[in-house]
Image (spheres, rainbow, N blue to C red):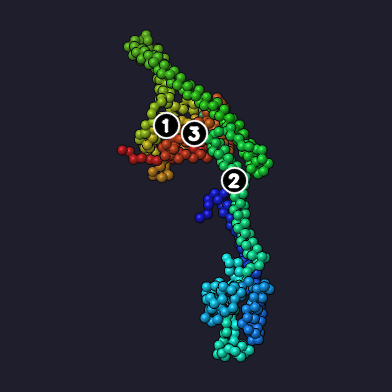
Amino acid sequence: MIPKSIKGKFLLLTSIFIFLGVWAPALFLFKQFRENFKERATVLIDAELEVIKGKLIDCMSSSSNKDVQALIQKMVEDNFFDVVRIHDEKGIVRFGTEKGQIGKKIEDVSPLKGNHEETKIVLLKDKGLFSAHTTIENKPICQNCHNTEKKVLAYLDVESKLTFAERNFFTGTVHTIMLGFVLAILLFIALYYSFNALIDKPVKRLENAFDELEKMNFNVQLPEDKKDEMGSLNLHFNRTVTKLKLSNKKIEELHFEQLQHADKLATLGELTSEIAHEINNPTAIISSRADYLALECEDNDNLKPFAQDLEVILKQTERISKITSNVLRYGRKLKTEFTQLKLADSLEQSLKMVELRIKKHNIELVKEIIDEDKFIYADQLQLEQLFVNLINNAIDASETGKKIVIRTYQNDKNKIIFEIKDEGSGMSEEVRKDIFSPFFTTKSEKKGTGLGLYIVKNICDNLGAEIKCSSVSGKGSSFKVTFNIIEES
Ligand SMILES: Nc1ncnc2c1ncn2[C@@H]1O[C@H](COP(=O)(O)OP(=O)(O)OP(=O)(O)O)[C@@H](O)[C@H]1O
Ligand SMILES: [Mg+2]
């Protein structure tokens, strides 16, 4: 399984590289050396065996058993071999440099054990010797004394201890392999700790610093004392954090100012509602008194010339009470309550609220409200707020005398589209992509909070409606809101 962390991958790769780059070639070389060494020693022993065999046959054919024993003894003294034995086909040692072994079975005394028809040379590392075995054939010269039918007369069995150099070589290779193994482990540990100190720790520190940054802790700083890549990374991180800290401070200040402004507007709204409420009472009194006087005028001829004036008073007080009741309705803080509503009715109601502004700016309002009996599911006040915000924006963008077209139409039988089009200032692409962000405004501080379209977008999301805006700078804008129609129940 491949480890997931960089550390795990690094250590795995390092181990593979150490094994493939150092270990495997070293093991191969050692194996090759050993084989060469063994082969050389085997060739040497083989040659020596042939020499002894020749000498033995010469000796046997010309001398006595004593001379054979003396000959093998000499072989040992001359350092040809360390132990020499000659045994018969039954495995009984007949001649031997180790006196105690004469007459014993070869199985009990020779490391090679038993008779072997072919020359055999074995390295016995644990015993630290070469053991060799060969046959003494029945040559014609031997047949003067021995039976002609026998192929093999005896077996020669020798032992040769490893020389100092040979022993050193074999133990040396083992030691070298062990040392290599220990060095590989030490290298691995050194790499592990270096990786920890140079990469793992700084990366973890950076990770923690990012965690802190995510929690908006802009006081987090990393050490910059190291001049390596990590030091430079930390330096850049610290600079970025400092910049973030500054811009966050600026954003907070700006937000605070905007919130203050929004708060002021909300207070103003509440005050306006209160004033409207206060105006309502005297207006009601004026209206009822004027009503009473109007009735009096009908019966009293002296008062008749004032009838027209009273009518004006009545009309104007009615207007005042309409305006105040609209202000009160709009300013009410009510719980949102979704009901089925006629889109056209809410639109008419909203238009009443902006009527005065439209007149004041001398704007030509064109209404094309066709599907008057289409119902949607919405909160009345939210819906009116949506329309009022869009109409107010259109008024703000239009100059005196310009035209605003408001229409509703259908493209799909389940949808109704409300569109408001103005011939005002329009927007650049840059402004257009930000209009739904909170507090985004191009208007002066006194004129706009930049919350209008943000609220409109939220209301649309609540209603499951879609809002789209298209605009050409200097030519005008159009906003389209697509509502879902519901069946009247
Ligand atoms: N019909 C329009 N024509 C041109 N620009 C518009 C129009 N409607 C909106 N905008 C641009 O979008 C910006 C954001 O509008 P939004 O209604 O959110 O805030 P505002 O009108 O500036 O402030 P507020 O609505 O709080 O009075 C406006 O400042 C204006 O630049
Ligand atoms: Mg607005």
Mark 2 Cα-neighbour bin, 10 Å: few <14, some 14–19, many ≥20: some
Disc 3 marks a residue whose amino acid type is: Tyr
Q: Which picture quadrant has residue 116?
A: bottom right
Look at the picture and state if 240 lies above or below 360: below
* Residue 250 percent location from the top left of the image: 59, 30
* Residue 372 percent location from the top left of the image: 38, 36
Whether tag 2 and tag 1 are in contact, CB under 8 A, the answer is no
Identify residue for label 1: 382
Identify residue for label 2: 196
Q: Residue at x 59, y 73 (%)?
A: 98
Look at the picture and state if 150 lies above or below 262: below
How far is mark 3 from mark 2, CA to CA?
50 Å
First in residue order: circle 3 vs circle 2 = 2
Look at the picture and state if 33 lies above or below 249: below
First in residue order: circle 2 vs circle 1 = 2
- Which numbered disc covers residue 466? none
* Residue 417 percent location from the top left of the image: 43, 40
How far is mark 2 from mark 1, CA to CA?
60 Å
- Which numbered disc covers residue 454? 3
Q: Quadrant of the C terminus?
A: top left
Disc 2 marks a residue whose amino acid type is: Asn
Please state which of the two labelled residues, at mark 1 or mark 3, is closer to the viewer: 3
Most foreground residue, 172 or 60: 60
